[in-house]
Amino acid sequence: IAMYASVKNIINKTDEELKELRALKINELNIGIESGMDSVLKYLNKGFTLEEARTQLKRLNAAGIDFSANIIIGSAGMEKSIDNAIASAELLNEVKPYLIFIATMHIDLGSKLYENLNSGVFVENTMGQNIKEEIEFLKHLDLNNTTFFGLHTSNVIPVFGILPKDKETMLEEL
């Protein structure tokens, strides 16, 4: 049984409860990590820290629960784009998701982030910078048998493959 979950959902479960959920066929949780940078997690109001994410995702591994990690390209803004790519890859290398789902930052009209964009507090990546960020992210991933799902409609260049086998092909496409 696959489902959406948050790091905040995992925190409230004991290790025994996580193992019990796995025994009940709960698996393949889809988790919105969004970034490997604490400042971005705070800015996006995720409700958890980088260390909490790291700890809870490792607890899922220990319980035998597979999870996909959603990462948002452009979530750190223009100034920290490459730092975000590297930090996000480092986190995922450590916690080892079975699937990485990539989407590009989308800012809704009327949102706080939209206000910050208009006031200059947040500077959005260009399309080219989003592609460069995704390339850096992919370059820094060191995972085995992990699906890289970059087919979301928000992505400028759709890529899909299994790491590490398809890494070079995806980098060439990007």
Image (cartoon, helix red, strand yellow):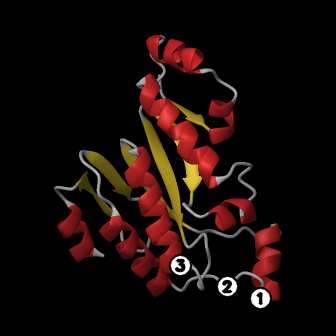
- The kind of residue on which mark 1 rests is Gly
Quadrant of image for the C terminus: bottom left
- Looking at marks 1 and 3 on the same chain, the residue that comes earlier in the sequence is marked by 3
Q: In the image, is residue 52 above or below residue 161?
A: above
Q: Which residue is mark 1?
A: 120
Determine which of the numbered discs, if any, sits on residue 97 in the image.
none
Q: Which residue is mark 2?
A: 123
Q: In the image, is residue 68 above or below residue 39?
A: above
The residue under the point 37% across, 54% down is 149
Position in image of residue 54 (x %, y %): 54, 46
- Judged left or right of residue 8, residue 165 is left
**Alpha carbon distance from label 2 to label 1:** 6 Å
Circle 1 — which element? loop
- Looking at marks 2 and 3 on the same chain, the residue that comes earlier in the sequence is marked by 3
Position in image of residue 159 (x %, y %): 31, 64
Circle 3 — which element? helix
The residue under the point 60% across, 69% down is 75
